[in-house]
């Protein structure tokens, strides 16, 4: 997958076009989210399959606008590793947000590292999301 192809995928994500997003997934995709070390969770959440991914993000996006910006991008035939600037702009209260309770109007900005595993057809078969840095809300620039 080229950087340009990946940017199209990100545009679908940023605009919540879930039906387009899942075209990039295998039927048995697993999405593994980072462990919340502060809260002592034994492991991060796992979404099994495209439907679980979509359900997770539809629920999350019902309380916020999430936007991604691509930083570093490294790709081989088997993997993509990238740095994603990620902004969450809360349109409703979200007491269960992974970084802690958020109120309408709050902004949370972070950098995440994401590792994508590709199948032989170039579709995502596994995605690992790792939290890296939290930035001041004043640095938000995408929404």
Image (cartoon, rainbow, N blue to C red):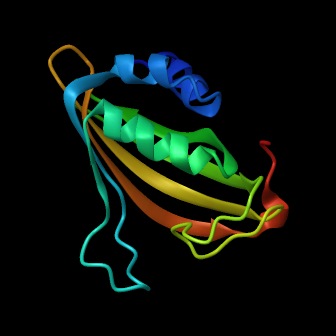
Quadrant, the N terminus = top left
Quadrant assignment, res 26: top left
Q: Residue at x 43, y 40 (%)?
A: 55
The one nearer the camera, 42 or 94, is: 94
The one nearer the camera, 46 or 68, is: 46
Total marks shown come to 0
Q: Is residue 27 above or below residue 138?
A: above
Where does the image place residue 40, in percent across and percent down from the top left?
34, 86
Where does the image place residue 21, in percent across and percent down from the top left?
45, 23
The one nearer the camera, 108 or 101, is: 101
Quadrant assignment, res 30: top left
Quadrant, the C terminus = top right
Where does the image place residue 9, in percent across and percent down from the top left?
50, 23
Q: Residue at x 56, y 66 (%)?
A: 97
Left or right: where 25 falls relative to 6: left
Q: Is residue 128 above or below residue 21?
A: below
Q: Residue at x 61, y 61 (%)?
A: 110
Left or right: where 27 falls relative to 17: left
Where does the image place residue 101, in percent across and percent down from the top left?
63, 75
Left or right: where 140 falls relative to 70: right
Q: Is residue 48 above or below residue 119?
A: below
Q: Is residue 62 above or below residue 104?
A: above
Specify whether residue 94 is in view.
Answer: yes
Q: Residue at x 49, y 65 (%)?
A: 132
Specify whether residue 82 is in view.
Answer: no
């Amino acid at each position: 997958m080229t950087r340009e192809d990946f940017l199209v995928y990100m545009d679908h994500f940023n605009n919540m076009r879930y039906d387009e997003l899942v075209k990039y997934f295998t039927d048995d995709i697993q999405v593994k989210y980072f462990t919340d070390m502060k809260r002592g969770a034994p492991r991060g959440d796992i979404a099994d399959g495209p439907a679980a991914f979509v359900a997770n993000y539809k629920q999350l996006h019902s309380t916020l606008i999430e936007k991604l910006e691509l930083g570093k991008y490294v790709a081989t035939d088997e993997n993509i590793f990238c740095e994603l600037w990620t902004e969450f702009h809360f349109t409703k209260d979200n007491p269960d947000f992974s970084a802690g309770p958020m109120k309408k109007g709050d902004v949370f900005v972070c950098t995440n590292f994401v590792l994508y595993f590709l199948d032989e057809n170039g579709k995502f078969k596994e995605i690992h999301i790792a939290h890296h840095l939290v930035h001041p809300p004043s640095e938000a620039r995408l929404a």
